[in-house]
Image: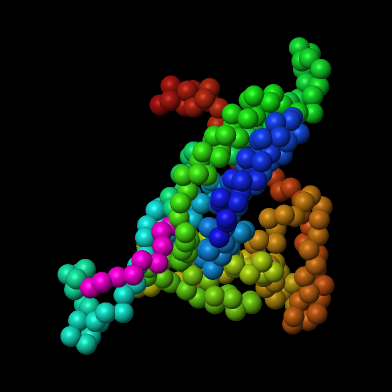
Amino acid sequence: MLDIPKRIKLISSLLEQDTEQSLTYAALECRLTLEYLCYERFKLYFSYLSESDLKNWQPKHIIKQISDDIDDNVSKEFSISISAEKIDGRLPKTKEEFESIKYTALGTQSELKLNKLHQLWNGVSNVALHIPVPSISSGDLSIYGDKDTIRKKVNDVVSFLSGIKGNLLMGGTFREEFGFNCFACDTKIKRPVRNLQHETAVSCINPRCQESYVIQKDGNDEFEVIRRVIKFLCAGCNEDLEVPTRLFRELRFDQKININCGKCNTLSEVIMRPLMKSTKVESPHNKALQRTSR
């Protein structure tokens, strides 16, 4: 878990130097710290969410996606306590029994205020970590931004970090889960059941595996797992050649994928090229004439 007081001390020492360079480095340390706060929470959910399924790389949006797709406790404040006490030699069963025994506090996870964090993350970047693109009305170029503006943004981040007092982080979910093993690499893939009420696409969490799947309910209200592939016919034996859909995500124009048929050993090439499909659309003028003639 990130040592926030240590980070604040480092950033404050750069502020005290009060040079253009030190303030710029302070802004960079602020941005890195804010990113770390989000990414260390994302790391706790590696077993649920593949990096390939992230819709946005910005720290705020990663945590928001975890909250929406896996567990909304990822950014909330809560405390955890444990107890070894029993009721008449047995474990508690009812809410009242659980509340009647003594607990030992383990710690608290601090709330992560995502909108504020995102605002600060963008703020230090805009004033210190980019050189504005010059225009015809620009003055002389400068490597560094305005000292007073940078200092204010950095102080805002320090104030934000000072308010984070938690001493633990917890990943996972207490809710019912559905899981299966990847058909290719046997890695366990799981999602909370409550987030699978509609058809859901998931990728294998193994970074070296290109497989992805659709999870949907069948006619018996049971979960069905369908491998996401694109099929091609082997030119040698007409066997179906299945290629994981994700292989095409990063493919550029004219790039090729070689597929070796496991049945007849024929080597086929799949080339990424545009495909045009035309659909005849009637003009509004023709539609008007048709209506008039009826």
Query: Is residue 278 depicted above or below 227 in this figure?
Result: above
Q: Is residue 44 magenta?
A: no
- At 70% across and 45% down in the image, what residue appears? 276
Q: Position of residue 287 (x, y in %)?
A: 49, 27
Residue at image location 59% in from the left, 67% down from the top:
205
Boundaries of the magenta span: 101-109
Residue 39, position as x, y percentages in the image = 58, 55
Majority secondary structure of magenta residues: strand
The type of colouring in the image is rainbow
Q: How many marks?
A: 0
**In this view of the protein, can residue 102 be seen by the observer?**
yes
Find the residue positioned furthest to the bottom: 89
**Horizontal side of residue 147 vs 180, given as left or right:** right
Q: In the figure, is residue 85 to the left or right of 143? A: left
Q: Residue at x 59, y 68 (%)?
A: 204
Where residue 294 sits: x, y (%)? Answer: 40, 26
Instruction: Return the x and y of residue 230 as percentages of the image width and height.
Output: 65, 64
Q: Quadrant of residue 140?
A: top right
Q: Quadrant of residue 217?
A: bottom left
From what the image shows, is residue 56 above or below residue 292?
below
- What residue sits 40% from the left and 67% below the top? 106
Left or right: 68 as drawn, with respect to 231: left
Q: Nearer the viewer, residue 20 or 140?
A: 20
Residue 94 in view, yes or no: no
Nearer to me, 291 or 66: 66
- Of residues 169 and 253, the one nearer the viewer is 169
Residue 103 forms part of the magenta stretch: yes
Q: Quadrant of the N terminus?
A: bottom right
